[in-house]
Image: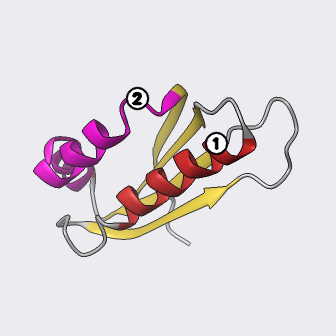
Amino acid sequence: MIKHIVMWNLRGETEQAKAAAVATLKRSFESLRGRIPGLLHLEIGVDSSRIDYACDVVLYSEFESQSALDAYAVHPEHLRVKQELSDLRIARHQVDYLAEPR
């Protein structure tokens, strides 16, 4: 299994604008559930720490294989979400790794 973790900082001059951006991102990614072959798990976490170096939002997802993650990267539904969110982010960080068997 491959774990795919992405963290973003989002645009928003006010708390309300930032909350709207977070809600849009959350809704967009959650719309992918059941639409991407090989996507086993997807969750969106919103930062509650409010410390200055924290990211605003994290995507935690699991894929059955590297090839499933590679297919996700170019899947039309994922590309749709990327397009919807392209103007919302100001920073993005990513880690993909092979999960060790338990």
What count of labels does the image hold?
2
In the rendered image, which residue does mark 2 sit on? 87
Farthest residue to the left: give it.
76
Q: Position of residue 23 (x, y in %)?
A: 53, 57
Q: Does the rendering let one see residue 77? A: yes
Q: Quadrant of residue 93?
A: top right
Q: Is residue 87 above or below residue 41?
A: above
Q: Amino acid at mark 1?
A: Lys
Residue at the (80%, 55%) spot, across then down: 48
Quarter placement of the N terminus: bottom left
* Left or right for 40, reference 48: left
Q: Please state the extent of the stretch shown in magenta in the rendering.
A: 67-89
Q: Is residue 59 above or below residue 11?
A: below
Q: How far is mark 2 from mark 1, CA to CA?
A: 13 Å
Quarter placement of the C terminus: bottom right
Q: Residues within 10 Å of mark 2 (few under 14, many from 20)?
A: few
In the rendered image, which residue does mark 1 sit on? 18
Q: Is residue 22 above or below residue 7?
A: below
Q: Does the rendering let one see residue 98? A: no
Check residue 97 for magenta coloring.
no
Q: Residues within 10 Å of mark 1 (few under 14, many from 20)?
A: some
Q: The residue tagged with tag 1: helix, strand or loop?
A: helix
